[in-house]
Image (cartoon, rainbow, N blue to C red):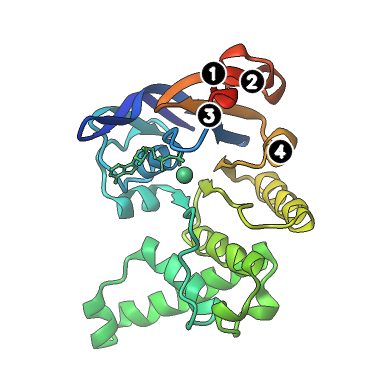
């Protein structure tokens, strides 16, 4: 579904991601793992258009998305969540999800101010799209609560709903289980499985090995910005280069 070739980005002298050639297959769960600072979040920032690569190409469903701005990447069907939750605590859960939908339709500020027919149509569309997204993450009952009133796990679900509201084909989750207890982690795994069963492709960065090993079909291992291994959980977990990267970190 998504293919990167020789993908890289430098920050000054630091190669945060270096010469990565890899694929995210459709209909599966791909995990990106690696020690802290390996370049995992940067990899997501590259494929979601937040960072412009210094080298390489990004193709999504056959289309070249290299150096496209984020809203164009979202419009093609790639959405992401962030490592640190970036919801609007004072707004309702529904309004948060509506913002996620707006990223896709990109109704202009002018439309909103002038209350144009397009704006009114977009507003209805956003609400419906947002409600569908809340239903998928099990938050319809909480739609009218301020997002900040939810538990940390609930707020993570709001972040996922914001991404889902843009109706993605590929969903990128950056450390979705961070700060979750074991029960919440199991519930999150069930949610991700449901989303994939419904046709979504998921790629996630995660530290919790129980989650990665129990969930991923395919694993990419980054170390110092480079892809050092890939394969099934069983293959990757007995790869000497992977063991060494984790022991040495
Ligand atoms: P990970 O998510 O695997 O822990 P990151 O992708 O966040 O790692 O970071 C990889 C490296 O790139 C780190 O050394 C980090 O400090 C650096 N880095 C990430 N983003 C930037 C940036 N915008 N400017 C400078 N350095 C950055
Ligand atoms: Mg990170």
Q: Position of residue 8 (x, y in %)?
A: 31, 28
Mark 4 → mark 1, Cα distance in angstroms? 18 Å
Label 2, residues with CA under 10 Å away: few <14, some 14-19, many ≥20? many
Residue bearing mark 2: 236
Mark 1 touching mark 2, by CB under 8 A?
yes
The CB of the residue at mark 3 lies under 8 Å from ligand 1: no
Q: SS of the residue at dot 2?
A: helix
Q: Which residue is mark 4?
A: 215
Task: Work out whether residue 160 or residue 39 is closer to the camera in this orientation and state it.
Answer: 39
Within-10-Å neighbours for mark 3: few <14, some 14–19, many 20+:
few
Image spot of residue 28 (x, y percent): 63, 35
Q: Is residue 128 visible?
A: yes
Q: Residue 187, image x and y in percent?
A: 76, 56
In this view, which residue lies farthest toward the front? Answer: 248
Tell which of 87 and 38 is nearer to you.
Answer: 38
Instruction: Give whichever of discs 4 and 1 has the lower sequence position.
Output: 4
Residue at 67% of width from left, 49% of height from top?
192
* Viewer-nearest of discs 3 and 4: 3
Residue plotted at (60% across, 41% down):
207
Residue at 39% over, 47% down = 76
Which numbered disc flags the more N-terminal residue, 2 or 4? Answer: 4
* Numbered mark located on residue 229 in the image: 1
N-term-proximal mark, 3 vs 4: 4
In the figure, is residue 136 to the left or right of 66?
A: right
Mark 2 lies within 8 Å of ligand 1 (Cβ measured) = no
Q: Earlier in the sequence, mark 1 or mark 3?
A: 1
Q: The residue tagged with tag 4: helix, strand or loop?
A: helix
Give the distance between the C-alpha atoms of the residues marked 3 and 2, in whole angstroms.
17 Å
- Residue linked to disc 3: 249
């Amino acid at each position: 579904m998504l293919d990167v070739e020789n993908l890289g980005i430098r920050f000054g002298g630091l190669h945060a991601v270096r010469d990565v050639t890899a694929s995210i297959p459709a209909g599966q769960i791909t995990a990106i793992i690696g020690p802290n600072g390996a370049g995992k979040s940067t990899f997501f920032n590259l494929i979601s258009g937040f960072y412009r690569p210094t080298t390489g190409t990004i193709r999504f469903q056959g289309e070249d998305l290299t150096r496209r701005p984020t809203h164009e990447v979202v419009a093609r069907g790639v959405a992401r969540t962030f490592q640190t939750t970036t919801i609007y605590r004072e707004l309702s859960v529904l309004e948060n999800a509506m913002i996620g939908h707006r990223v896709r339709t990109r109704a202009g500020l002018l439309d909103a101010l002038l209350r144009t027919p397009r704006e009114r149509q977009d507003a209805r569309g956003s609400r419906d799209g947002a409600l569908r997204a809340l239903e998928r993450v099990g938050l319809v009952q909480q739609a009218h609560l301020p997002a900040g009133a939810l538990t940390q796990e609930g707020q993570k679900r709001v972040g996922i709903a914001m991404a889902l509201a843009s109706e993605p084909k590929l969903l990128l989750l950056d450390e979705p289980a961070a700060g979750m207890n074991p029960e919440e982690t199991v519930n999150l795994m069930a949610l991700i499985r449901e989303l994939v069963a419904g046709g979504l492709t998921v790629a996630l960065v995660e530290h919790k090995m129980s989650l990665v090993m129990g969930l991923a079909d395919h694993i990419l291992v980054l170390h110092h910005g480079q892809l050092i291994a890939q394969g099934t959980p069983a293959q990757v977990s007995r790869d000497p280069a992977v063991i060494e990267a984790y022991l040495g970190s």
